[in-house]
Image: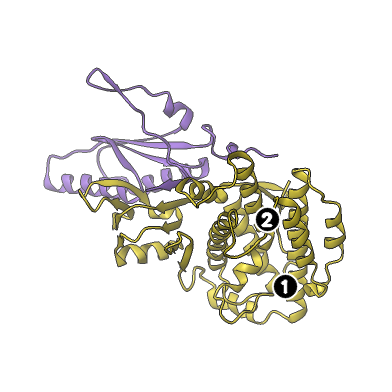
Chain colours: A purple, B yellow
Amino acid sequence: MLSDTNRFNAYRIMWVLVFFDLPTETKKERRAASQFRKKLIDDGFTMFQFSIYLRHCPSRENAKVHTKRVKSILPKYGKVCILEITDKQFGNMELFHGVKPIEVPQPVQQLELF
Amino acid sequence: MIKRTIYIGSPAYLRLKQKQLVVENPEDKSIKGTVPIEDMALLMLDHYQITLSNQLLLKLQGNNVAVVSCDAHHLPFAMMLPLYGHTEHSDRIKHQLEASEPLKKQLWKQTIEQKIKNQQALLKMNDKPYEQMDLYWQHVKSGDTTNCEAKAAQHHWKYLFENFTRERFGNSPNNLLNFGYAVLRSIVARALVSSGLLPVLGIFHRNKYNPYCLADDIMEPYRPFVDKMVYNYISQYGVPEKLTKECKAYMLNIATQDVWIDGVERPLMVAVTTTTASLYKCYEGELRQIKYPTLD
C-alpha cells in the first residue's frame, strides 16, 4: 500500500520568498517599483511584509519556474533577493506581532473548500 | 505538477483580480481567499448563491480549468471546458477521427482488461473472493465481444460491499460512488482536452446523448480507485446516510491518490494525463499499448 501523504510532504513543498528594496525618489522609480510589485502578485505571490512577498509551490520544479519568472521581471534599479526554502524550514519560522506570537502561514492544500 | 481543486459550497462572489481567483463573501464583501488561476485544475460550484464574472470564466478556460456546477442533489451536473486546449488541435483530431475500427476495438480490449485487473486487485486487497476474476480478464476479446466487463462487474459489486446493488439513483453508498465518478469524469475530460482530443468521440461508448463518450471510456480503469476510496470510507465511518460536505471533501481527494503508471508512482491527476497522451500516440500509430494505472 502506498501512503497518501508522501507526495505532499514538508521536504517537497517549497516557498519562494522575494525581498526587495527599490528606489522611490522620482515618479519613474515609483512606477517601476509598483509595476514590479503588481507582476509579483500576477504570478501568485502574496504580501508577507511591505517589501517581502512569498509564494507556495507544490514542488521544487514549480519553485524553479516562479524563480525564473521573477528574474525575468526584475526592475532596472534597486535590490532584489530571491530565496527558495522548504516548507519544513518555513514552518520553523517564529512570527510576532509586537510581543504577541502569531501563526506562520499554512501551506495551501491541493483541495480547498470555500 | 499536481494542480489544485477548489470547491465552493457557500454563497460567494467569484471574480478575477490580477490573474487570481478572488473568493468574496457577498454579505460583508470580505475576501475569503485568493488562488492563482494557473495553479487550478478543477473548480466545483455547489451552491445556488454563487456569482462569477465572465472575465473569470474566460481566464479559467484559458488555463484549461474544468468548471463543474452541481444540481439540487449536490451531484455534478454540468461541466465547462475550452473547445481546444492544445496547439495542434485540428491535426490531433484528424488522427482521432481517422482511427480504424480494429484499433478502437483493440484499445477497448486493453481498457477492459486493465479495469478488471484493478477490480481484482481491490478485491484481493480486502480479502474478498478474487480468483474468479482471472477468468474474466484473460478472456477479454477484441472489442469485448463476450462482454467480460459486465460479468466482472457483477462479481465485483457482489463481493465488494455487503447487501449492495449498484444503481444510478440507488441507496447509499451509490451516491458516494456517483459523486466520485463524476469528479473522475471531469478530471479525465480535462486531460483529454489538454491532449488535443475530442471528448465527444468515444472508442466504445457511442450514446448519442452523451457528450463525454471518450472520457467515459478512458475512466474505466480508474473507477476501481474511486471504489477503493468509498470502500475505505465505509469501513472507517460506516455507510453515510447523506452526501455531507465531509464526504465530498473526502471524495474530492481522488485527484491526489497515488497510482502506479508506466513504472512510476504519480498522483492520479497526473497519471490521467499520461494515459491521454498515450492514447493520442495510439491514434497516431506511434504506440500500440495505451498506458493505464495499476492498483496495488
Query: B261 left or right of A43?
Result: right
**Does residue B56 sit above or below A108 in this rendering?**
below
Say which of B24 and B101 sits in front.
Answer: B24
What residue lies at 74% left-to-right and 81% top-to-bottom?
Answer: B101
Q: Indicate which disc, 1 or 2, sits on the residue closer to the N terminus.
A: 2
The numbered disc on residue B285 is: 1
Foreground: disc 1 or disc 2: 2
Query: Judging from the image, what secondary structure is the residue with disc 1 in?
Result: loop
Residues packed near mark 2 inside 10 Å, few (<14), some (14 to 19) or many (20 plus): some
- The amino acid on which the numbered mark 1 sits, given as a three-letter code, is Gly
Q: Are marks 1 and 2 on the same chain?
A: yes
Foreground of the two, B243 or B117: B243
Q: Residue furthest left?
A: A26
**Disc 1: which chain?**
B
* Residue A2 at x, y percent in the picture: 67, 39
Q: Quadrant of residue A108?
A: top left
The answer to whether residue B47 is left or right of residue B254 is: left
Q: Position of residue B96 (x, y in %)?
A: 64, 77
Residue B287 vs residue A70, the one in the foreground: B287
The answer to whether residue B289 shows anywhere in this view is no
Q: Is residue B222 left or right of residue A41?
A: right
The type of residue carrying mark 2 is Phe
For marks 1 and 2, give the CA distance: 42 Å
| Residue highlighted by disc 2 | B164
Q: Which residue is painted at 54% across and 78% down in the image?
A: B90
**Relative to residue B23, is residue B219 depicted above or below?**
below
Above or below residue B175? Residue A76 is: above
